[in-house]
Structures are given as C-alpha cells and as structure tokens.
Image (spheres, rainbow, N blue to C red):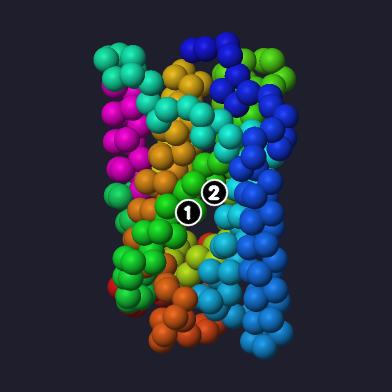
C-alpha cells in the first residue's frame, strides 16, 4: 500500500490535448442534448424509447469523461501503465487480481444473470459490446474522480476506499433507481432478485475493486473491472440498438422490475 496519491494534483490545461478534448466533449454534449430535446418534443413522455436512451447514455458518458479530466483521472490514465512490470511477478498481486476477476465474473455472469430477463430482445453484439465498454470506462472514471477527492484529504487509501464506497455507491444506486434503470436501461430486473444482485454482485465488485486499488494503486485494473461487469450486464439484458424495429417505443417500466410470477417471456 502506497502513501503517494494515485490521482496526483495537477494544473488544468497543462497539456496541449486538454483544450481539444474539452471543446470536443462540449460539442458532443451540445449535439446530444439538442437531439434529445428535439426527440422529447416530438415523442410522448412516460415511455421507454431506445433512441432517447442512447442519447441519455451519451450525455452521461461524456459528462463522466469531463469530470474525470477535471479531477485528474484521465490525465493520470494517460501516464501510468495498465500493470507495473514488478506486479507480474508479485504472488500477492496475482492472487488478489485473480480473486477480483473471479468475483466479478461470478457476480455478474451468474448472480446478476439469474436475476435479469431480456424479454426476447435481440442481442446485437456490434452495438452492445462498445456500449458496455463505454459505460464501464465512464462509470469507472467517475468513481475514480470521487476517490481522488477523498485521497487528497491526506487520510490515506483506506479512507479513500471507504469514502468512495459510501458516496460513490450511494450516488450510483440513486442514479440507477431514479433515472438510469427506467430511462436508459430497458426493462430487465426481476423484483425478487434485486437485493441478491446488490449484495452478491454490486457490493463485492465495488468493495474488492476499491480494496485492490488501495493495495496496489492500479487505476486501470479498477476501471477494467467495471468494464467487464457492465459489459456482461448489457449482454445479459440484451441492450437494444438505436435503429430498426428493436427501437420501438414501449410503455415505461418500473426500474425495480417485475415480480417473477408476472414474467412470461424469456
């Protein structure tokens, strides 16, 4: 465990790429926002619309990337290796990384999958996999931005891990319950499985990922864990593409999902 900051303090716009990144991201946000505003005026409210879901997701992704840049996360990712060479011969690092991988794969590939239903939606890998990767990077960088705030208090990596778990986990839970799981993700939850998914998938993922980060200072390992978890999630739920018949507007769903007895489709 290191006492050095994983996300160092830095001066904004100290590198040439930053102004291009910020202006480009703001331009993308403007286009996405105007497109969403236009669709909101033309289409009914209170419904699930995959085309608007993709626009909302894009707004979230690029907002996370801007927060990541401002917090110093993105510049740090540009300057650190995915894995330090000495770690590849460290038995403790290898064991902890393997354990984290198993927990994420089991949590999302088994527990989360059993509590999720796709309702017969087609699985379009060409869009689902890039969506999952973008979602994982955006969410991972946002959580690392929260981490960077806590570690700058000087209380150490354990305090940063605990603070990120409490604040990041709470904010992420509220975000999903109040917005993401109804306006971005399609109907996929099974009501009776929600607590099990939280306790056996989400919590272990975040706790062990933050513990690994505190021990080994590998921000990329943390982010890649979120990429794997969320890519599995969109694969299991069969996240809809934004074109064709699969983008038909559907009645709005409850983010908590439906009772198992009411689910008749696969």
Per the image, label 1 sits on a secondary structure element best described as: helix
The magenta-colored residue range is 94-108
What residue sits 41% from the left and 39% below the top? 225
Looking at the image, residue 211 lies above or below residue 252: above
Magenta stretch secondary structure, dominant: helix
Mark 1 — residue?
134
**Residue at image mark 2:** 138
Q: Is residue 11 left or right of residue 198?
A: right
Q: Quadrant of residue 96?
A: top left
Q: Quadrant of residue 157?
A: top right
**Residue 157 visible to an observer of this rendering:** yes
Which residue is at 70% across, 66% downward? 30
**Image side of residue 212 versus residue 165, left or right:** left
Q: Quadrant of the C terminus?
A: bottom left
Residue at image x 58%, y 14%?
4
Query: Is residue 45 magenta-colored?
Result: no
Looking at the rendered structure, the secondary structure element under dot 2 is: helix
**CB within 8 Å, label 1 to label 2:** yes
Q: Kindly identify which numbered label has been placed on residue 148.
A: none
Q: Is residue 100 magenta?
A: yes
Q: Is residue 51 above or below residue 4?
A: below
The residue most toward the front is: 16
Place of residue 49 in the rendered image (x, y in percent of width and height, measured from the top left): 55, 78
**Mark 2 surroundings within 10 Å by alpha-carbon count, few (fewer than 14), some (14 through 19), many (20 or more):** many
Lateral position of residue 216 relative to residue 69, left or right: left
Residue at (71, 85) in percent of width and height: 41
Q: Where is residue 42 drawn, in percent x and y?
A: 67, 88
């Amino acid at each position: 465990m290191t006492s050095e900051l994983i996300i160092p303090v830095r001066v904004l716009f100290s590198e040439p790429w930053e102004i291009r990144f910020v202006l480009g991201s703001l331009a993308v946000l403007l286009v996405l926002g105007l497109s969403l505003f236009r669709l909101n005026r033309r289409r009914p409210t209170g419904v699930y619309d995959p085309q608007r879901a993709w626009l909302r997701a894009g707004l979230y992704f690029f907002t996370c990337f801007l927060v990541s840049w401002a917090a110093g996360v993105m510049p740090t990712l540009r300057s650190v290796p995915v894995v330090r060479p000495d770690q590849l011969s460290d038995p403790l690092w290898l064991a902890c990384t393997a354990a984290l991988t198993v927990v994420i794969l089991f949590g999302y590939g088994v527990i989360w999958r059993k509590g999720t239903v796709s309702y017969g939606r087609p699985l379009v890998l060409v869009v689902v996999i890039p969506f999952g990767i973008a979602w994982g990077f955006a969410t991972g960088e946002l959580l690392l931005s929260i981490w960077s705030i806590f570690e700058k208090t000087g209380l150490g990596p354990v305090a940063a891990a605990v603070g990120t778990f409490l604040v990041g986990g709470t904010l992420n839970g509220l975000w999903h319950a109040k917005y993401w799981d109804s306006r971005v993700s399609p109907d996929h939850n099974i009501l009776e499985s929600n607590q099990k998914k939280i306790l056996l998938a989400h919590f272990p993922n975040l706790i062990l990922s933050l513990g690994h980060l505190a021990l080994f200072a590998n921000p990329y390992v943390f982010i890649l864990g979120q990429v794997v978890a969320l890519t599995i999630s969109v694969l299991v739920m069969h996240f809809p593409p934004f074109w064709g018949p699969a983008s038909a507007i559907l009645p709005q769903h409850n983010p908590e999902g439906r009772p198992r007895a009411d689910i008749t489709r696969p």
